[in-house]
Image (tube, rainbow, N blue to C red):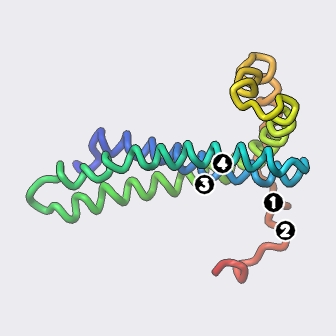
Amino acid sequence: MDFLTEKVIYISLFILVIHTIETLAYAVRLSGARVGLIASALSLFNLMVIVSRMANMMQQPFTGSLVDTAPSSNTLSFVEDQYRVIIGASTIGTIVGIILLPTFVALFSRSIIHLSKQKGSIPSLFKTFFSLDYIKRGLNQMHFPNRTYLKGFSMAHIP
């Protein structure tokens, strides 16, 4: 367990958040289709994807430096174990995003409607959403995936 350094833990947490955001970005597209405001949804989707990809690009030097800080003996297995932790964190981040998807579809549907009312201004949208009243309303929208979402799904659809 000596491969589990403080640096690996920080990188793993950062990657977990990045993958959660990247997964939840697709909730924006679904929300836009549901409310019929595709252009506003694509604008918000592109903003989220750019943020997650920039964050991913920023963490790459830290991930790459893991090889430089590896001990000289048994280097390959040491780095392999560190990367397994990082890949596991990205998997967990994607699963967290999947679990939060229904909640964020509901939140983004309202966000897209408010964005169109704000005439496309994302800063004014953020200003509105960080008020205490909107945060309380957002907490009421929380719900988790249902078994009915898997209706019609089979393993034959997975490539």
Point out the image quarter for the C terminus: bottom right
Q: As shown in the figure, which amino acid type bears the numbered disc 2? A: Lys
Q: Which mark is residue 95?
A: 3
Name the secondary structure under disc 2.
loop
Q: In the picture provided, is 21 more to the left or to the right than 150?
A: left
> Mark 2 to mark 1: distance in Å?
7 Å
* SS of the residue under disc 3: helix
Q: CA distance from mark 1 to mark 3?
A: 16 Å
Q: Residue at x 18, y 52 (%)?
A: 68
**Mark 2 near mark 1, Cβ–Cβ under 8 Å?**
yes
The mark nearer the N terminus, 3 or 2, is 3
Q: Residues under labels 3 and 2: Cα distance?
A: 19 Å
Q: Nearer the viewer, residue 112 or 96?
A: 112
What is the x, y in percent for residue 38?
A: 83, 51
> In this figure, which residue is indicated by the disc labeled 4?
46
Q: In terms of sequence position, does the residue under pointer 2 or pointer 4 come before the other?
A: 4
**Amino acid type assigned to the residue bearing label 3 in the image:** Ile
Q: Which residue in the protein does label 1 denote?
A: 147
